[in-house]
Image (spheres, coloured by chain):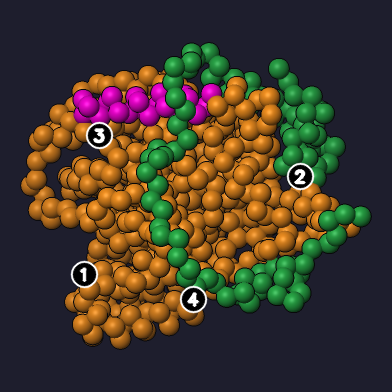
Amino acid sequence: MPLTLQEVEHIAKLARLELTEEEKARYREQLSAILDYVAQLQRLDTSSIPPTASIFSGDSHLRPDEPRPALPREALLKNAPEHEQGQFKIPPVFE
Amino acid sequence: MLSLTQAQTLLQRGEISSRELVSACLERIAALDGAIHAFLYLDADGALKQADEADRKRKTVAGEHMPLLGVPIAIKDVLTVEGMPCTCGSKILEGYIPPFTATVVKKLQDAGAILLGKTNTDEFAMGSSTENSAYGPTRNPWDLSRAPGGSSGGSAAAVAAGFVPAALGTDTGGSVRQPASFCGVTGLKPTYGRASRYGLVAYGSSLDVVGVFAHSAADAAVVFSVYNGRDPLDATTQDVPDANIVLETEASASLEGIRIGVPKEYFIAGVQSEVEEAVRAAIQKMAELGADVREVSLPHTEYALPVYYLIATAEASANLARFDGVRYGPRVSGETMWDVFYKTRGEKFGDEVRRRIMLGTYALSAGYYDAFYGQAQKVRTLIRRDFEQVFEQVDVVACPVAPTTAFPLGAHRNDPLAMYLEDIFTLPANLAGVPGLAFPVGFDAAGLPIGMQLMGRHFDEATLFRLAHRYQQATEWHLAKPTIDN
């Protein structure tokens, strides 16, 4: 079932991607084709199959939660497009 | 152009200096990388300084315990090296200079390796041809009109072209093995959790693993033995003894006792006949060397592609949320914070990355999660179980790396699904977390390399290396070198 234009716009909004009208049309077509293809998975009865989230899930090895030196603030701010007083700077969140 | 073990030997004997070796690599890169475009960043001055340092250390006690001392290596541009730009092949990280070094790279440095620079990649490792790099494609050294494979195409081409004896890549769905096959080199994808992902810019976190390219299994084993191992900075690295691969130097070892399974699902319509013939001939050769060969079945193979493109994209959609024009990379300005997010991500991510983010976002979104992402995770279990069952019968599985040899640049330009189909034989190993080793076993009529893949049990890279090494002692495919028309 092909995606609607509204669905493409909804996904792009969730993903925080600004798209042109031409891009929306193209992604609509391409994503619809890919979703048609992956829908073959629904043929399989998996009602008794547990999901695999990660191959060795459950035995992740957490290190002791102890304070240790982190990267220096200046080194991290160096890559920021804008910063001020040791903080990342962004435009207003609300208008 | 020297192989890694040749370089090691000459350096140890003092017959060449690291400065001479690095200079020769830099000269070759200067002459030929304009045509190939394997490198996104070359640190020529830094490399020569490191080489001089290595030549000084050679005369010290510490130098005797550094297996890669003075050996030049290239790094795929999705791994961080402090002070070297890291773009991930994307405009969204243009100008980013990481303040820290990936653990696997640090281990190479500690072993004495010289870092020459960063190699080209499909944007965020999403692709099978390196054409999705925002900085232009890499070309296959065997035929400049063809793709080197991807996403680690820069590293594969750098080794094939003789720019470096070894290079690191990453493999989420075949991104080391497929370019190794296309470029006629040996490439390892280790077991998931075998090597640290700290400093690897994440694509699909449950699938990503750092691999290596070299001219032979023996060379790849040296580098893998250095960079693998548990890392407190990556909780998914497993608590198993570090791998230290030691291979027979005498070409007399028998493969007796090793059981090779040939999965019928990997020899299907659509596989180039020359690929099938070369892979079957290589399996026959291994049988002559003592291995026991039998047919096996991995019945859910056909589902690996849809499972992969849901799981990998879902993980990518979450992982790539961090690129928002706030902490690193360029910012496209906007009135509000939200405008900045939409515009920066919309403009700076490339076409394929946006497509995968959208696919993953959809698969995870309310109302579709169970049918897509949830179902993919369950079918992943079936694929994993296929391998568990097969590895009760055999020690390794042998098959083609890819259905075809290197395709022309632009072949899949307007058809993303056709590009995804290039990965059908490499995706299952990532979904099951098992190791895979790709190496050359012949050429097609057009003179392009054909690759074969061995897959093994979790953490049993050693058996893959043993088989491939013995095969390479008995054959010469891995010694063939491209003639590069500049």
Which mark is first along the chain, 3 or 1? 1
Distance of label 3 from label 4 (alpha carbons)? 41 Å
Residue B315 visible in rendering: yes
Amino acid at the residue labelled 4: Ala
- Check disc 2 and report the residue beneath it: A17
- Check disc 3 and report the residue beneath it: B396
Which mark is first along the chain, 1 or 4? 1
Q: Residue at x 83, y 56 (%)?
A: A93
Disc 1 and disc 2 on one polypeptide chain = no
* Foreground label between 1 and 2: 2
* Foreground label between 1 and 3: 3
In the depicted view, which residue is nearer to us: B469 or B408? B469
Q: Residue at x 21, y 25 (%)?
A: B393
What secondary structure is marked by label 4?
A: helix
Magenta-drawn stretch, dominant element (helix, strand or loop): helix
Circles 1, 3 touching at the beta carbon (< 8 Å) = no
